[in-house]
Image (cartoon, rainbow, N blue to C red):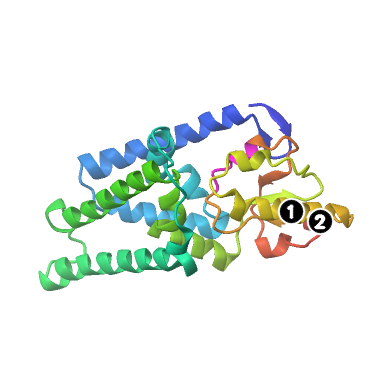
Amino acid sequence: MQMEGKGQIDPQTWKGIRSVMQVQLMVAFVVAVLMLKQWWFCALMIALGGLLSAFHGRIWCGLLCPNGGFIDLIWSKISLRLLPFPRWLNKGRVLQSAFLIGMIGYFAWIVWLVNVHKGLPIAYASYAQHGYLFLRFCQVMLALAAGLAIVFEPRTFCAHLCPGGTIGTIAAALTKRSPIVMDAEKCAGCRVCTSVCDAPDRLLVPLIEKSQTLQAQGKKEKLPISPECYGCLDCVAICPKGALRVETLNASETEGVPLKEAQ
């Protein structure tokens, strides 16, 4: 692996590594959910994504999520990108909240139907009882993500609808964890990173603009990216100056803190 600077690797090498990680979870998903009908796998993926987000931000979404893998490796290749997703539909994160509440309500209904209404024990789990309904949920999410990816930008579902991603964003915001930080003094303002980001205007452009302001003031700081970032790390790999890097420190401990004090 080529190392050109701290936190930077060869973009093509990173792309291959990321694809391998995604394929592994995609295969596990297909085998566990679509072939073996193991309903618990869906719930496990959501739980693990939220847990990891509490420590490293939404890196799960960008590296390990099976649905994200299908989007990046399949649907993005045939995406028509007919028009940008109408952001007003998710104003105030109404859509994200609605999908999250809907998912929680659906899962609660399944448990009530099987374990309360039908009187089956909590430990009882089968395709005929829990599995069929959980499987339908997974199929709907896969189909919706695919449809949005083909019509709009590939990661539209992840940015505006995914209930698992919303849990990750909430977990990252509560623990103030940021998967990526920018060393303000190193940023050249070239915006090469924005070419590989699915939401550069919301995630990277604010950091670039702030870094330029800090440079003009002669300050050296680390700037954490928004908790909404799903941590694909493509920007880290492509940055020619090594200004973007993976960071595991609490975002509140890095923002506005001089580099020599935060390291």
Image: 69 above or below 88: above
Q: Secondary structure at mark 2?
A: helix
- Quarter location, residue 166: bottom left
Q: Is residue 263 visible?
A: no
- Quarter location, residue 43: bottom left
* Closer-to-camera residue (138/150): 150
* Closer-to-camera residue (184/152): 152
* Magenta span of residues: 231-237
| Magenta segment includes 234 | yes
| Magenta segment includes 149 | no
Q: Amino acid at mark 1?
A: Glu
Residue at position x 37%, y 39% in the image: 70
Q: Amino acid at mark 2?
A: Thr
The residue pinned by badge 1 equals 209
Would residue 39 appear left or right of 204 to someone viewing this image? Answer: left
Kindly check if marks 1 and 2 are in contact, taking CB atoms under 8 A apart as contact.
yes
Q: Is residue 155 visible?
A: yes
Q: Which mark is residue 213?
A: 2
Question: Where's residue 75, x and y in %?
Answer: 38, 37
